[in-house]
Amino acid sequence: MSTPDRTPTDLETVRERLNVVTQETRFALVQDLLGHPEGLPTLKELDYVNPSKSRTTIRQHLQQLIEAGIVEEVTLPTERRRNDLPYKFYGISEEGRQFLEAHDLLRAEETLHDVYARVEKTDEIERYETAPRPER
């Protein structure tokens, strides 16, 4: 009988991450992050495409995804910020992308881009969507 390649600690980490990612609201947020044209939406954009969730709920779920290492918060450098545009964005971390890929959770990425592009957006959301993003 062969021994598994992963230690129990690794398996527990994978199980916990899968539980975090596959929860309905968090999975929807991951899909929104993947579907965004720049892969870095703002909280306002996420709020807009999730009208049945409060901004507080979205923020809490994003925080859980950040703590699990799936999502990262990325800020625009101070010298590139403008008063009328966002400077804080959310995206899939490199570690998160590897995890999602390893568990076949990235298969629909192209479709998610198409779906996101078809969402009817207000002028404000379009302005946010086209705002400068930080380098990653």
Image (tube, helix red, strand yellow):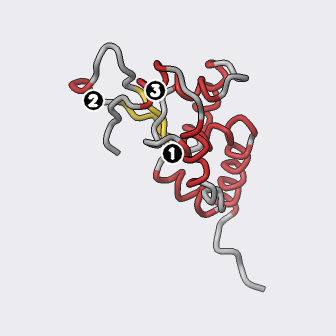
Q: In this figure, which residue is indicated by the disc labeled 3?
A: 126
Q: Tell whether 41 sits left or right of 87.
A: right
**Comes first in the chain, label 2 or label 3:** 2
Q: CA distance from mark 2 to mark 1?
A: 19 Å
Q: For the residues labelled 1 and 3, say whether their Cβ atoms are less than 8 Å apart.
A: no
Q: In this figure, which residue is indicated by the disc labeled 1?
A: 92
Q: Residue at x 67, y 37 (%)?
A: 26
Question: Is disc 3 surrounded by few (<14), some (14 to 19) or many (20+) residues within 10 Å?
Answer: few
Name the image quarter holding residue 131.
top left
The residue furthest bottom is 1
Q: In this figure, which residue is indicated by the disc labeled 2?
A: 77
User: Judging from the image, what secondary structure is the residue with disc 2 in?
Assistant: loop
Q: Amino acid at mark 2?
A: Pro
Question: Is disc 1 surrounded by few (<14), some (14 to 19) or many (20+) residues within 10 Å?
Answer: many
Residue 96 on image: x %, y %: 54, 51
Q: Amino acid at mark 1?
A: Ile
User: Judging from the image, what secondary structure is the residue with disc 3 in?
Assistant: helix
In the image shown, does 55 or 98 lie closer to the viewer? 55
Q: CA distance from mark 1 to mark 3?
A: 21 Å
Q: Residue at x 66, y 49 (%)?
A: 17
In the image shown, does 17 or 32 lie closer to the viewer? 32
**Comes first in the chain, label 1 or label 3:** 1
In the image shown, does 85 or 8 lie closer to the viewer? 85
Q: Residue at x 55, y 38 (%)?
A: 66
Residue 45 on image: x %, y %: 53, 27
Q: For the residues labelled 2 and 3, say whether their Cβ atoms are less than 8 Å apart.
A: no
Q: CA distance from mark 2 to mark 3?
A: 21 Å
Q: Tell whether 39 sits left or right of 2.
A: left
Depth-wise, is mark 1 or mark 3 nearer the camera?
A: 3
Q: Residue at x 36, y 20 (%)?
A: 85
